[in-house]
Image (tube, rainbow, N blue to C red):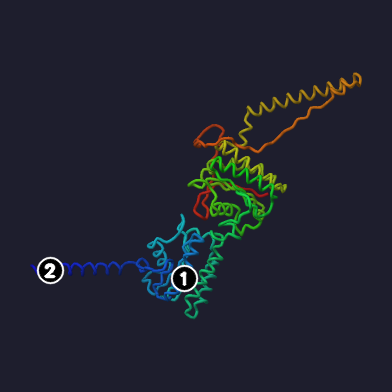
């Protein structure tokens, strides 16, 4: 009995070791894979340490820059799994992927079947076509034709930079989707050069004031190259990837003037989705589309800002709702009064002239001049109140929404001009 107790710890350790070996044997190979280098899973041992360090550094830089995990995987034994299941298991079991959609792009060098395999997940799929992946796969195969696995992996990284350029959050110079270049004025991104400096300055001041007072961001973007994207996708992506939006939900809206597609698009996010219903957006488009057709880009942008400010100030009330029956009756009364006065003045002047052309008659014939001044709406409120769920004068309609490439929800609408 004493000998049994003496050896029981060793026996217990042996049993535990056996259990661990059994568990590891039944787990998918990818679930047990470990790496000392972020972004590189070299289970097949194709790289030396210096190469692993180099590739890991590239993977980390690109993954951060494009908001997508960009990973190289090698294996000599994936068991009974096919390439898809193997990579998918690696993806799930190692918590890979970035952003709301857990975006990731994988290169698998399968030494069991001597195959090259590419796998994409999440938002990155919005920027890759099947043709892109097929071409890249063939190019990588050619690069590693003489067992040059480092060259094949570097080609993968280099080509990823080209294909994922729209997701670039670090290219300050030429890419509109991340770190948009400074145009000189806040909230106004005039890449198509439709506005002069004075116009940009005035629009910028108005946009900044609206954003500061209501914590609803607002911007104007003009482009002459939409990079093959729809106006909706371009506006959404620019908004998401350039730090626009207020608060945790990124509240705000942007007007895109897409001169490439000859289309305007208004994209909304966060609280702005509720404030700017489909009907509100249609009201704004009704006004600014003709101005775009007349090449009056400044006036279109100015109207967008002033009408948006009205919607925000009145918590989603339609711009067209200012023309209520009471307003119409008041306007009609004023028109009739002005018309009556004008007729009376014309009659009195005619009578005086006919009665004898004295000085008094000429003075009586002086006409009345009416001036109509249109001011940009500027609020004087310094605080915001909660948006009521239902109250008179609201749009009466909801907001259509869709999901952008970043996984964010946007509302909006647009028209051709």
Q: State the CA–CA distance, disc 2 to disc 1.
A: 51 Å
* Disc on res. 55: 1
In percent of width and height, residue 191 lies at 65, 55
**Where on the picture, by quarter, is residue 171?**
bottom right
In the image as oriented, which residue stretches furthest toward the bottom? 146
Mark 2 highlights which residue? 6
**Where on the picture, by quarter, is residue 343?**
top right
Q: Earlier in the sequence, mark 2 or mark 1?
A: 2
* Disc on res. 181: none
| SS assignment at label 1 | helix
Regarding residue 176, the answer to whether it shows in the image is yes
Q: Nearer the viewer, residue 395 or 52?
A: 52
Total numbered labels? 2
| Whether residue 85 is situated above or below residue 250 in the rendered picture | below
In percent of width and height, residue 32 lies at 34, 67
Q: Nearer the viewer, residue 150 or 400?
A: 150
Quadrant housing the N terminus = bottom left
What is the crowding at mark 2: few (fewer than 14 residues within 10 Å), some, or many (at least 20)? few
In the image as oriented, which residue stretches furthest toward the right? 356
In percent of width and height, residue 85 lies at 40, 66
| Whether residue 223 is situated above or below residue 89 in the rendered picture | above
| Whether residue 101 is situated above or below residue 289 in the rendered picture | below
In percent of width and height, residue 45 lies at 40, 75
Regarding residue 265, the answer to whether it shows in the image is no
Relative horizontal placement of residue 175, taking residue 150 as reference (left or right)? right
User: In the image, what residue occupies the spot 15% across and 67% down?
Assistant: 8
CB under 8 Å between discs 2 and 1? no
| Whether residue 266 is situated above or below residue 122 in the rendered picture | above
What is the crowding at mark 1: few (fewer than 14 residues within 10 Å), some, or many (at least 20)? many
User: In the image, what residue occupies the spot 39% across and 72% down?
Assistant: 43
| SS assignment at label 2 | helix
């Amino acid at each position: 009995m004493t000998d049994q107790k003496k050896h029981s710890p060793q026996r217990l350790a042996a049993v535990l070791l056996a259990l661990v070996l059994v568990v590891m044997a039944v787990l998918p190979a990818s679930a047990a894979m470990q790496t000392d280098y972020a972004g590189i899973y070299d289970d097949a041992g194709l790289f030396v340490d210096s190469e692993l360090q180099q590739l890991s550094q590239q993977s980390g830089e690109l993954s951060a820059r494009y908001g997508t995990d960009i990973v190289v995987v090698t294996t000599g034994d994936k068991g009974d799994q096919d390439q898809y299941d193997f990579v998918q298991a690696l993806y799930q079991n190692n918590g890979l992927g970035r952003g709301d959609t857990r975006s990731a792009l994988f290169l698998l060098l399968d030494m069991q079947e001597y195959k090259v395999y590419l796998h994409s997940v999440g938002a990155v799929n919005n920027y890759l076509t099947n043709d892109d992946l097929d071409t890249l796969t063939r190019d990588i195969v050619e690069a590693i034709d003489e067992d040059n696995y480092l060259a094949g992996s570097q080609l993968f990284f280099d080509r990823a930079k080209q294909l994922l350029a729209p997701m670039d959050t670090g290219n300050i110079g030429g890419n509109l989707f991340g770190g948009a270049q400074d145009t000189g004025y806040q909230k106004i991104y005039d890449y198509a050069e439709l506005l002069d400096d004075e116009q940009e300055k005035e629009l910028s001041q108005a946009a900044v004031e609206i954003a500061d007072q209501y914590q609803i961001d607002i911007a104007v973007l003009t482009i002459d190259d939409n990079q093959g994207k729809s106006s909706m996708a371009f506006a959404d992506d620019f908004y998401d990837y350039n730090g626009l939006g207020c608060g945790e939900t990124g509240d705000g809206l942007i007007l895109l003037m897409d001169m490439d597609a000859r289309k305007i698009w208004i994209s909304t996010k966060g609280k702005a989705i509720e404030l700017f219903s489909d009907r509100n957006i249609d009201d704004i488009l009704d006004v600014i589309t003709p101005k775009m057709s007349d090449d009056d880009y400044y006036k279109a942008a100015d109207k967008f800002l002033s009408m948006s400010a009205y919607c925000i100030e009145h918590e989603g009330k339609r711009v067209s709702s200012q023309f209520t029956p009471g307003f119409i009756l008041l306007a009609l009364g004023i028109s009739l009064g002005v018309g009556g006065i004008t007729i009376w003045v014309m009659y009195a002047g005619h009578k005086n002239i006919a009665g004898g052309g004295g000085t008094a008659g000429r003075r009586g014939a002086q006409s009345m001049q009416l001036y109509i001044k249109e001011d940009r709406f500027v609020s004087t409120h310094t605080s915001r109140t909660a948006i009521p769920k239902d109250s008179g004068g609201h749009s009466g309609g909801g907001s259509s929404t869709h999901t952008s490439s970043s996984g964010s929800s946007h509302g909006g609408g647009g028209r051709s001009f």
